[in-house]
Amino acid sequence: MEKRKFERVALNEPVVVEGKHGERVVGSARDVSIGGMFVEGVSATFGAHVIVHLHLPSESAALALPAVVRWVHDGGVGVQFGLLGARETHALTEAIARASPSHTRERAAEPVEEIDVDVDVG
């Protein structure tokens, strides 16, 4: 059963995930919605609070998106965004409107085992 409230769209953009102690890891955003994203190549603890730095082509500066790790799976993490400002919400909404639906929807609907790991600082 699909639990997502928002449609996800495909995205292939580099991101920097910052942990609460300032550690930074480079990953790749694979899909995004106004509620969250899947970041490939990053390992983090379930429930960890992070900042996802994402530069969208339509923006002059990177967005800093507060998020919580909600699942760890398939070489990456799924994050749920926290409170976003007007600039971030507008930029994400515009990027989603221009993008194609994500094909990770089916994969994410499968049962996921929660894994507790530390942020990988490379």
Image (cartoon, grey):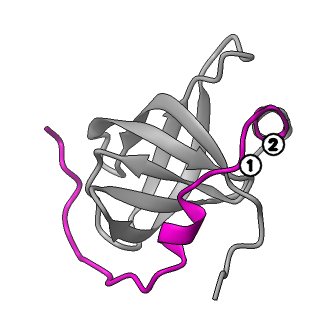
Which of discs 2 and 1 lies nearer the camera? The answer is: 2
Secondary structure of residue under mark 2: helix
Say which of 69 and 78 sits in front: 78
* Residue 73, image x, y percentages: 33, 67
The single residue placed furthest to the left in the displayed view is 122
**Snapshot quadrant of residue 60:** top right
Expressed as whole percent of the image width and height from the top left, the position of residue 27 reads 35, 37
Q: Residue at x 65, y 59 (%)?
A: 82
At x 58%, y 23%, the residue is 55
| Image quarter in which the C terminus is found | top left
Q: Is residue 104 left or right of 97 when viewed as pictured?
A: left
Please, what is the three-letter code of the amino acid marked with disc 2?
A: Thr
Q: Residues within 10 Å of mark 2 (few under 14, many from 20)?
A: some
Judging by the rendered image, the residue that carries numbered circle 2 is 89
How many marks on residues?
2
Magenta residues, dominant SS class: loop
User: Vertical placement of 113 versus 83: above or below?
Assistant: below
Image coordinates for residue 49, horizontal then vertical, percent:
44, 60
Q: Quadrant of residue 112?
A: bottom left
For marks 2 and 1, give the CA distance.
6 Å
Q: Which residues are magenta?
A: 95-122
With respect to residue 119, does 90 lie above or below?
A: above
Q: Nearer the viewer, residue 8 or 47?
A: 8
Structural crowding at the residue carrying mark 1, measured as other residues with C-alpha within 10 Å and reported as few (<14), some (14–19) or many (≥20): some
Q: Secondary structure at mark 1?
A: loop
Tell me the tag on residue 84. Answer: 1
Q: Tell me which corner region of the image, top left, top right, bottom left or bottom right, holds residue 85.
A: top right
Q: Decide: is 34 above or below 109.
A: above
The answer to whether mark 2 and mark 1 are in CB contact below 8 A is yes
The quadrant in which the N terminus is found is bottom right
Say whether residue 89 is left or right of residue 42: right
Residue at 44% in and 52% down: 50
